[in-house]
Image (cartoon, helix red, strand yellow):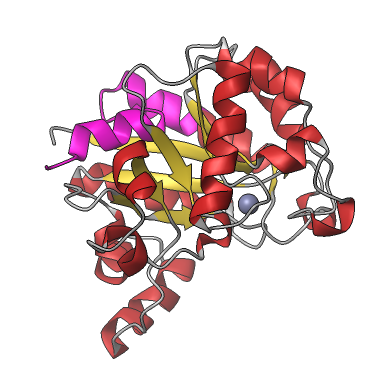
Amino acid sequence: MDKAIISLSFDDGREDNYRLFKKFTIPHNIPVTLNVATAYVDGSMPAESWPTKKGPMTKEQVIELSGCSSIELALHGDAHDNTEPDVRAGRDKLASWIGSPEDGKWGFASPYSKLPVEDFVSPDAPPFFKNDILYMRTGLKKEPLTQLQEICRKTCKVLPLPIFYHTTYGYAFMQECPDRVIYSFPVFNALSFTYVKGIIDTAIRYKGAVTLMFHSIEPDSASVDEWSWDSDKFRKLCAYLVRMQKRNKLDIATTRDLYNKIKTD
Ligand SMILES: [Zn+2]
């Protein structure tokens, strides 16, 4: 790795994401990955089962976005579930809407990050997971932190220095990916711009590949759900990423391109 790679990954297929991409990321040529829960988007999932109270973009909008070279469309279950039949149903639908990727393999963002890594990498994993999924994006590891990591985790919030992030979440500043699992930082509305900028600075410092997980991007994100982030913070973050990219400190990439750079088979 000669520099950091940053990928921006968006979950569900929410209607605000369509507007964000059309008005902001596409015109600024910022690559993004959109993970589509197909039953949420095509209306076959009842509203009470939606992953958020926010409504979805339409199937036609997903198809339109698939024509854009800076957007990767990836799987997120059909009914926002992690079972093999549901993920496969999501793949079948998305493939019928937009066609399959050239290599026939799909990125997959685990809904709620609930598919255990062990189940995905296990030799007994369903053949579909092994043969048709290029990578699985999940959240941060769920195992408990050491006492030192716990101190560093708290310190990041007041003193956003790379050493503290790296001590706490070193594995998420990825150098290689032997098991097709991409860890990601969930960006929820309590996180400040400064905190997220600290993640980027750590990726630059350690030349790591980092994925940020987003949901809705709205002016009043707290009114949407706790996983959403304010649009002014997001724009500021993108301006910083573009500035650092121009200075050759990092590349902004889709999660697929990030994975292909660090995969080790
Ligand atoms: Zn989701």
Percent x, y for residue 147? Answer: 30, 90
- Does the magenta-highlighted stretch encompass residue 264? yes
Residue 134, located in which quarter of the rendered image? top left
Image mark count: 0
Image quadrant where one finds the C terminus: top left
Q: In which quarter of the image is residue 172?
A: bottom left
Q: Identify the image quadrant of the N terminus.
A: top left
Residue drawn at x 22%, y 53% as measured from the top left: 179
Q: What stretch is highlighted in magenta?
A: 239-265
Give me the residue at 60% from left, 21% from top. 96
Residue 187 among those drawn in magenta:
no
The reply, left or right, for residue 231 in relation to residue 209 is right
Which residue is at the far bottom?
Answer: 147
Residue at image coords 58%, 50%: 86
In the rendered structure, the answer to whether residue 134 lies left or right of residue 191 reads left
Q: Position of residue 217 (x, y in %)?
A: 70, 41
Vertical order, 178 against 125 (above or below) = above
